[in-house]
Structures are given as structure tokens and as C-alpha cells.
Image (cartoon, helix red, strand yellow):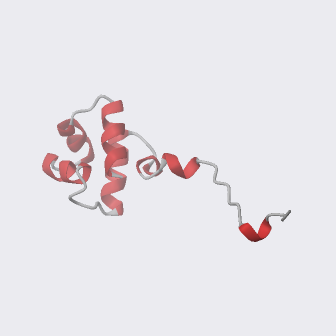
Amino acid sequence: MTALLRAVRRQRGLALEQLAQRAGLTKSYLSKIERGQSTPSIAVALKVARGLDVDVGRLFSDESAHETITVDRAHDRLGP
């Protein structure tokens, strides 16, 4: 959530203090979340998402999770 939170906040053009006020959190706590020094509860994640006006899932989505992965197992290959 840390890198995505910062990216979405910046994308929205919000300063850390603005988001903290919108979410009802302290600026220092929000900063700790962004830097990975604190893990937010589900309730806090929901507050942050509301403050950003995004679905909470967006803060946890991983772009790599949408990549196509191909598995090539040796026993599935046809031999010569």
C-alpha cells in the first residue's frame, strides 16, 4: 500500500497534510504509512481511500498482478 498510496496522493495533487485532514488522521501517521514504517488497519485504509476518493482496492492493487504468466512444465513438453 505504501508506494501506491503516495502515487495516488500525488496523482490527486494532494499534499500529505491535505490528505491527513480529509482522512481524519495525523500528518505524521500518514507519513509513516507512506514510508512503510506503520501498517494501517482496515479502518484506516478505508479512511485514506475515502480521503483520496478512490476504491480501497486501488491502494492495494499490484500492477504485476495483472501480468500474464505462462507456466511451462518439463513433464508437459513433448520430447524429440
| Residue 79: image location, x then y, percent | 84, 65
State the residue at coordinates (15%, 49%): 26
In-image side of 26 versus 7 (left or right): left
The x, y position of residue 80, in whole percent, is 86, 62
For the point 17% across and 53% down, which residue is it? 29
Quadrant location of residue 5?
top left
Q: Which residue appears at 26% of the width and 32% of the height?
A: 14
Q: Residue 12: x, y in percent?
A: 34, 31
Q: In the rendered view, tell whether residue 15 sits above or below residue 39.
A: above
Q: Is residue 58 left or right of residue 37?
A: right
| Front residue of 71 and 32 | 71
Quadrant housing residue 41: bottom left
Outermost bottom residue: 75
Residue drawn at (19%, 48%), measured in percent from left and top?
31
Q: Specify the farthest residue to the front.
A: 80
- 50 vs 70, nearest the viewer: 70
Q: Position of residue 62 (x, y in %)?
A: 47, 50
Count every numbered label the image shows and give the total: 0
Above or below, comparing residue 69 to residue 19 in the picture: below
